[in-house]
Structure formats: structure tokens, C-alpha cells
Amino acid sequence: MTQIIDGKAIAAQIKEELKEKVARLKEQGTEVTLAVIQVGADPASSVYVRNKKNACAYIGIRSLAYELPEETTEEELLALIRELNGREDVNGILVQLPLPGQICEERVLDAICPGKDVDGFHPQNVGALCIGRPGFVSCTPAGVIQLLKRSGVEIAGKECVVVGRSNIVGKPMALLLLRENGTVTVTHSRTRDLKEVTARADILVAALGKPRFITADYVKDGAVVIDVGIHRNEDGKLCGDVDYESVAPKCSAITPVPGGVGPMTVAMLMYNCVESAALQQNGKVS
Ligand code: GUN
């Protein structure tokens, strides 16, 4: 029987744990606060931002919403980030991506104080992950690790294959699996004979961004398959990077889309915010 990894339930469990921590911090005089910045009104971004604000409200995190017009200049955005960096009552700063063309994403992400970079996108946090130092980890791959651990999937010693090498998912995913002592291979669009590589995986993470690309012939019998993709197919239904119908019967465990990795991203963002507040309260970061 294939285990369906219930991301919604695991995310809910994490949020309950965080609710208690937030209440405890409040008793000690710290109100966990996340600043969420959106530039323009991209409809997908608006949905993500709303989900993040709702999760904050549920857990008891104060969210400060900055909805800036599409024509905001880079300098204006950088000025806001500098102001938020300097505010003691702000624990986390999140700039929703993508940004309009006139703003350089790299300069904006670099401007966020690493101790408040709850998205884990700042080069200092990426570097810390790479060399095993403490720091914020990108939320989606951190969520995948939680899904595996909380579903009883052992990572140490396993053949882990990550399909996709983006800065937000593929690369940090590979580093996290390595940190858990997996044997890790990263594949990408130039990989020769992809099927031969993915068919070796005990744990296969699909993060390539192509709807239902990973079919049964890419997957070993009994593998654990994690689907990071999310797409809308021709008839408006959500699907992932994995062809769920053909792959699920072959796996020992699989994440569905929706209800797999998706809910974990927001849960881990909340986790990072709480962690940030706790560290700032203890004076470990400024
Ligand atoms: N846009 C798409 N995914 C993300 C994310 O995880 N964080 C931010 N800030 N923007 C995004």
C-alpha cells in the first residue's frame, strides 16, 4: 500500500506547535512580527501573500503588510527594507517575488538583514547552509525535510535524487538532504539519460517545473516521491511535476498535489519567523 504523505495535516501540526511557542514568547514580552512586502498586484503573488497573512493571524504572529504600487522604484523599496532592518519590533522581512522589471531582485534580497531573512534567500544564509552553520533555510525544501521526517522516512544513507537546480528549491534541497546524510545527486535540463539516474533514487524530489513530467518509468519500485511542482492543467485542475496516477502505485510513499509540499512552505515560513524572534530575544542576532 502506498503511503500518501498528508502535507496539510503535517503543516497543521507544525502550526499548532508554533501557536504555543508564539504564546510563550508573548508572555515573555516578545510579539513575533513579520513584515510582508508586495510590489504590484500579480494575482498569484496576491494569493500567496494572503495565505501568509492568514497563517500569521492563525498562529498569533503580527503581520505588517506593505502593498506598494507596481511603479515603485528600487531605491524606494531599498529604503523601506533599511527601515525594517533597523526596527527592533520586526523579526522577519519577506519580499514577495517576482518583482517588477525596474527592480533588481538580487540587490533587494541582499539588502535584507540576514537575521531577518525568513525566506532564507540571502547569500549569507545560503552560504551558512552550504557549510553547516546555523541560518535560515529556504521554506519549501525545509518543508520537504519535515514531511520526510514526520512520515518516518529515514534519509541517512539513502540514494536521493533531486530533479531541478533552482536557487529556491533544487540547490538548498540537495544541501539539506546531504546534511541529513543522504547520498545526493542533482539533475537538470542537461543531464544525460535522466530516467537512468532517477530510477536509482530511494527518495526522488521532483522540482523541475514541468507538469506531470515524472512518469512511472522514472521511478524505482518502492521509492519515496516528493512532488514540489504545482501547475494548472487544461481543465483547470491542479497537478504537480509527477504523473501521480501512474507513479503512486509504484511508490512506498508519495506527496499529492494539492495537499503535499504546498502547505509546508507557509508552515516553514512561520517556523522561521518564530525562530527569528526567539533568537533576537536571546540576543543571538541583531
Ligand atoms: N515567490 C514564489 N515563491 C516565493 C517564496 O517562497 N518567497 C517569496 N518571497 N516569493 C516567492
Image: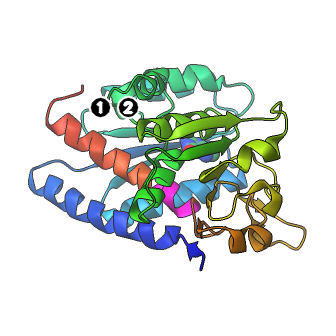
Pick the front one: 199 or 143: 199
**Residue drawn at 71 percent across, 55 percent down:** 43
Look at the numbered disc 2 and give the secondary structure of its residue. Answer: helix
Mark 2, residues whose alpha carbon is within 10 Å: few (<14), some, or many (≥20)? many
Q: Which residue is mark 1?
A: 87
**Which quadrant is home to the C terminus?**
top left
Where does residue 58 sit, x and y in percent of width and height?
36, 67
Per the image, is 263 magenta?
yes
What segment carries the magenta color?
262-266
Question: Which kind of residue does numbered mark 2 sit on?
Answer: Leu
Pick the front one: 213 or 168: 213
- Residue 108 picture quarter: top right
Whereabouts is ligand 1, in terms of quadrant?
A: top right
Where does residue 53 sit, x and y in percent of width and height?
46, 58
User: Looking at the picture, does residue 64 appear above or below residue 84?
Assistant: below
Q: CA distance from mark 1 to mark 2?
A: 5 Å
Can residue 148 be seen here? The reply is yes
Look at the numbered disc 1 and give the secondary structure of its residue. Answer: loop
